[in-house]
Each structure stands twice: as C-alpha cells, then as structure tokens.
Amino acid sequence: MTAGINLLCSLLSDTTPTIHHNTNTMSTTTTTEPITVPAGEYYLSDPCYIIRDSKDWLDVCHQLSNQDGVKYAIMKTYSVTVKGHTCVMMNTYHGDGEYRSNYGHRLPVDSGMIGLIPVEFAEDKDKEFAKVKFDTPIQPFSSDGTMYFGKITIQTNWEEDDI
C-alpha cells in the first residue's frame, strides 16, 4: 500500500523511511487538527509528479516523517512546505494506481498520495495536471477511504467487486 512513497523516498536518501500504519481502523479520519487551504488555484495530483526536484522531494519525505512522530499514517492529511509553498496531501487507501474525482479528474498515483500543490510551484506547466480553483478556503480531509477537497471527492477505497 505504501510502497510508492517508500520507494520514491528511498531512491533519494541512503535510508528507507520507516512506514507506520495507524493503529486505529482505516475507516476513521486520523487528522486531529484541520488544515485550511487558502482560496486559489492548485494542481490536484500525485505530488511526486509536480515536486520534481529530488532535493525538494527528499525534503517532503523528511517533513512527512517528522509529523506527529509518525512516519506515515493511513488516511491522514499532511501539510508540507516546499520552497515557501504550502502543499496539502493525503495518502490513498490502496496506494498506487489510478483514481478519479467526482468531477472526472483522472489522477494517476505513484507515491501513494494525492494532494493540492499551488500552481505557482509547478515547474512543468505543460503537463496535463488536474487544475482546480477554490473561491473560498477549504479544509481537506479523508474518511472511509474517500478524500474531500472542498466539493471534489476522490474515492480511494473500493472492494474487489468494484474493479
């Protein structure tokens, strides 16, 4: 499930980050403090596709590993800062793969996460990332395998029968 971020982080450092799973059931929301995302334009994507610089990605991995003393928790909302830009991300319930939002955004995932990255940060603006705009601040969260980014939802938990 978390092999993607584990692999991407281990490729960039000498040590593989320890991956810890939440001891609570995965059907509960694990974020205790809401994270507010300001109104604005963002790319909704696997952050590894937008945070391309290896030093920046390693910094993201270190920030993820230092939040709440937990290396990586299932269905938790993370906030990281990269080059002065705040990025919000959540890990998917089933890890890597392809997910779709309720608005039809196609979201391939290789790091096990989906997040909001400010458009100002993206170096490669020619790529076809899902560009979204929020007119008011939002508080992203996840619950029961579904991610909520304002009115955008992404179901990352499915049963074998759904595939």
Image: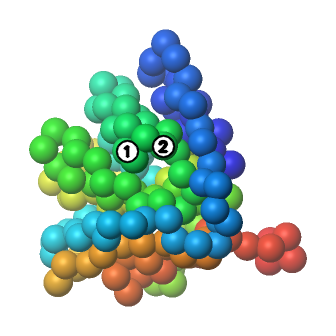
**Residue in the foreground of this view, choosing between 123 and 96:** 96
Label 2 sits on a secondary structure element that is loop
Residue 27 appears left or right of 89: right
> Which of the numbered marks, if any, corresponds to residue 67?
1
Give the residue displayed 41% in from the left and 81% down from the top: 152
- Spot occupied by residue 80 in the image (x, y as percentages of width and height): 28, 48
Q: Distance between the residues labelled 1 and 2?
A: 6 Å
Query: Of the residues shown, which amino acid type is indicated by label 2?
Result: Val
* Mark identifier at residue 126: none
* 64 in relation to 106, above or below: above
Residue located farthest toward the right when viewing the structure as drawn: 161
Is 125 in front, or is 4? 4
Residue 54 x %, y %: 35, 26
**Tags 1 and 2 touching, CB below 8 Å:** yes
Kindly tell me whether residue 27 is visible in this rendering: yes
Q: How crowded is mark 1: few (under 14 residues within 10 Å), some or many (20 or more)?
A: some
Q: Which colour scheme is used?
A: rainbow
Quarter of the image holding residue 40? bottom left
Q: Residue furthest top?
A: 14
| Res. 100 visible in picture | no
Residue at 16% over, 75% down: 39
Which residue is drawn at the image coordinates 51% and 84% (left, top)? 102
List the residue tagged with mark 2.
Answer: 70
Residue drawn at x 31%, y 31% as measured from the top left: 59
Could you classify mark 2 by the number of other residues whose Cα lies within 10 Å: few (under 14), some (14-19), or many (20 or more)?
Answer: some
Whether 30 is drawn above or below 51: the answer is below
Is residue 92 rendered to the left or right of residue 157?
left
